[in-house]
Amino acid sequence: MQVLVRDNNVDQALRVLKKKMQREGVFKEMKQRRSYEKPSERRIRQEAEAVRRARKAARKQAQREGLLPMPKRKVPAGGARPRPAAAPAASES
């Protein structure tokens, strides 16, 4: 895995590296390897993960076919939506 450091910005490169490692499942694998996992426990875990993946795929397929409502879209934190205009203040005369 490789990350480029631009303009000596090591903090940003470290964040990118951590995000890549998280996406690849490196942290999850490191946590699992801290202690021994019996073959029976590994089999149970893998079957549970397979069931979880199958359910997720079926849910996504049902959403694409229109059987389930699509999930709500996340609004970016940067404030991409325009803010509503403030109502004019009522003047007391």
Image: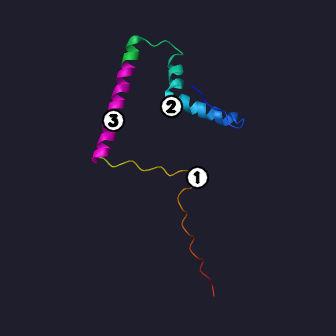
Foreground of the two, 34 or 4: 4
Measured as percent of width and height from the top left, residue 80 is found at 54, 56
Ranked by sequence position, the earlier of labels 2 and 3 is 2
Magenta stretch: dominant secondary structure? helix
Q: Which residue is mark 3?
A: 57
Q: How many marks?
A: 3
Front residue (pair 54, 38): 54
* Marks 2/3: CA–CA distance: 18 Å
What's the amino acid at mark 2? Arg
Q: Residues within 10 Å of mark 2 (few under 14, many from 20)?
A: few
**Residue 20: image tag:** none
- Residue at the spot of label 2: 23
The N terminus lies in quadrant: top right
Q: Which residues are magenta?
A: 44-67
User: What element does badge 3 sit on?
Assistant: helix
Residue identifier under label 1: 78
- Where is residue 68 shown, x and y percent of the image? 30, 47
Q: Residue furthest bottom?
A: 93
Asked whether the residues under the numbered discs 2 and 1 touch, taking CB atoms below 8 Å apart as contact, a structural biologist would say no
Q: Based on the displayed image, in which of its 4 quarters is residue 84 positioned?
A: bottom right
- Going 44% across and 50% down the picture, which residue do you hit? 73
Q: Is residue 68 left or right of residue 1?
A: left
